Amino acid sequence: MSGSSLFVPPHRFRRGVALTLVFGGVLATGGIAGSWGDEARNSARNPPRSAAGSDLANAAATADRQAVEDAAAHASAAGQSGSQAAEEVVSRSGDRWSAVYSEREYEDVRQTLDGWYVGVGLWVGSGADGRIDVTRARPGSPAERAGIRAGDRLLSVDDTPADGMPVTEIVARLRGDGQDARAGSSVDLVLRRDGRTWRETLHRARLAAESVTDEREADGTTVIRVRSFTKGSGDEVRHAVTRARGGSGVLLDLRGNSGGLVSEAVTAASAFLDGGLVATYDVRGEERSLYARKGAVDTRTPLVVLVDSGTMSSAELLTGALQDRGRAVVVGTRTFGKGSVQMPEELPDGSVAELTVGHYRTPSGRAVDGRGITPDLVARERAVERAGTVLTGLGGGS
């Protein structure tokens, strides 16, 4: 049974737009904080043309910042929706990663990147027959306090049948949309356990995202799962690696990781790499570099990285660094292929345009955007089991 936590992008992201969570970009943190602004704005007008990455600059069309701003300003002056006008310009650009969001939506993203979300604390999974089951109720959450537990079957959310609905849709409904996404708002669930069906009304709360978890298996392997790179998750990975020392190996599970803050992915890389290049990126036609910090936690314990088609953006950056630097064996399926960099730009009406300003590459110079990362061992079935076999072969098991 596959599972999903409640920590996923807000409801609107199901349209396929990345925004900062999927890969806010190397510049995202600085952009939100007000630094690197001029550099990113200039590069939006003049797409990057570095010698090492000119083909990458042409890999996807980008929305021109000035055109987006002008459209929004003209519409606002005419008493129309500036954000809708800007969104139309972005749509015409053909760049699927650039997008325009309302002030409220963007605030939701910033909150998520800070490691918080509004929800009820349920993890759910779908079985082969399409039924939706609870896989976990987070301790202390509204769901746990209501007595919901793993194994309960979820029949409906706000009177919408759950069976056959994608897990991502279930999660979005549990989190709510618009006014419903606020702490204190309610969601009605119908559940079943041991033949008993009952209705439960839960009130959403502001919860800390559990983006990193780790567990020591009986054979000495430590499984570190990173669901996304939010504020502080890089250090959480480092702490997990510290706890893993002395074991037989580390399985770093990045499956379904939609990305996040690049600075956190670089910090995570620093747990395994003692300095050196993590990635390069281009801005204003110039190539810049990201380096792991010195003093790695562990550079010797056998390491396998588990990925799939849901491994995106900064998670791909981390994967590519560990693979290129020879620190890990990558197992799973080809990753998503999101290697572009977006920069937030506030529009006159308070909405925010996320515009593509560049692309990144792995230490060996591989482009990721539109290509993804190919595992060293492709495993579509029994990926975890095969990853364990690889660890054993690396000396990580007996």
Image (cartoon, rainbow, N blue to C red):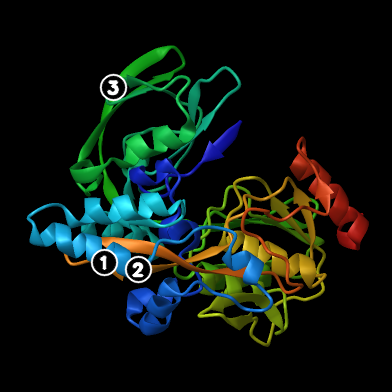
| Residue 66 position (above or below residue 90) | below
Q: Seen in the image, is 269 located left or right of residue 201?
A: right
Say which of marks 1 and 3 sits in front: 1
Q: Seen in the image, is 300 located left or right of residue 238?
A: right
Q: Mark 1: which amino acid?
A: Glu
- Confirm or deny contact between disc 1 and disc 2 (CB under 8 A): yes
Please report the residue visible at 23 percent of the width from the left and 50 percent of the height from the top: 84
| Residue 369 position (above or below residue 40) | above
Inter-mark Cα distance, 3 to 2: 49 Å
Name the residue that disc number 3 marks. 199
Locate residue 64: give its quadrant.
bottom left
The answer to whether residue 207 of the structure is visible from this angle is no
Which mark, by number, is residue 65? 2
Name the residue that disc number 1 marks. 69
- Confirm or deny contact between disc 3 and disc 2 (CB under 8 A): no
Q: Mark 2: which amino acid?
A: Arg
Q: How crowded is mark 3: few (under 14 residues within 10 Å), some or many (20 or more)?
A: few
Say which of marks 3 and 2 sits in front: 2
Q: Mark 3: which amino acid?
A: Arg
Inter-mark Cα distance, 1 to 2: 6 Å
Which mark, by number, is residue 308? none
Please report the residue visible at 24 percent of the width from the left and 66 percent of the height from the top: 70
Q: Nearer the viewer, residue 297 or 111?
A: 111
**Of the residues under marks 1 and 3, which one precedes in the sequence?**
1
Image x and y of residue 234, in percent: 55, 70
Please report the residue visible at 26 percent of the width from the left and 44 percent of the height from the top: 204
Q: Seen in the image, is 351 located left or right of residue 175?
A: left
Q: Seen in the image, is 386 located left or right of residue 176?
A: right
Q: What element carries label 3?
A: strand
